[in-house]
Image: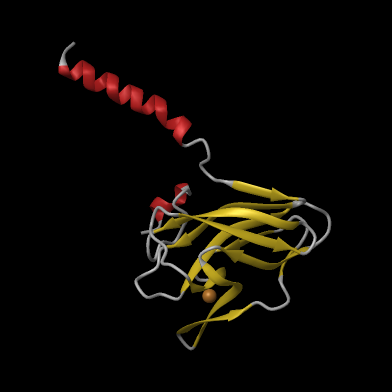
Amino acid sequence: MTKPFLAALISTLAIGIMPGAMAQPSESYRAGSIVVETPWARATPGGATVAGGYMRITNTGSEPDRLVAGSSVIAERFEVHRSTVVDGVARMEPVTGGLEIRPGQTVELKPGTMHAMLVNLRQGLKQGDTVAGMLVFEKAGVLKIKYHVAGIGAQASPEAPSAHGNH
Ligand SMILES: [Cu+2]
């Protein structure tokens, strides 16, 4: 076999393997009427005490539900925060009383708006890591998820196709 032919064969094989490796382009988790898609987190710089967690939460049911709590193995606490900009200064405040997801609504937790906050980290998050976590919904109950860790300052999930459009 000639070298170009081998190279072509290898790249064909590589492409052939990819769909298997990428069988879960966006991971989704379901509990009752709640579907959580593509949970991800940001890698943290050294010494950081908090990390942002992001995901899409959809309520496919006919009654409102609430994200009332959560946890992660790598942090002491889980909070839901809302980011705001007041007089040009970015701030965030905890969402109290649970985050409501109305019937048919999709709530996006993403950088710059509503987000999950993993507080008092026990360890730093490195890009490429997978971090186990748990969400607790008032009606749907407990949902175990895994956050994929994207780079520091990433704007989208490492899984999402749109990640390439957000430099
Ligand atoms: Cu926050």
Snapshot quadrant of residue 154: bottom left
Image spot of residue 86 (x, y percent)? 51, 86
- Residue at x 76% of width, y 51% of height: 33
Looking at this view, name the residue that lies furthest to the right: 62
**Image quadrant for the C terminus?**
bottom left
Please determine whether, in this image, residue 47 is positioned above or below residue 24: below
Q: Is residue 161 left or right of residue 33?
A: left
- Residue at x 57% of width, y 63% of height: 72
- Residue at x 55% of width, y 72% of height: 76
Image spot of residue 133 (x, y percent)? 58, 59
Snapshot quadrant of residue 81: bottom right
Specify whether residue 113 is in view.
Answer: no
Specify whether residue 10 is in view.
Answer: yes
Image spot of residue 49 (x, y percent)? 45, 76
Snapshot quadrant of residue 26: top right
Please determine whether, in this image, residue 146 is positioned above or below residue 52: above
**Image quadrant for the N terminus?**
top left
Looking at this view, name the residue that lies furthest to the top: 1
Image spot of residue 152 (x, y percent)? 37, 64
Looking at this view, name the residue that lies furthest to the left: 2
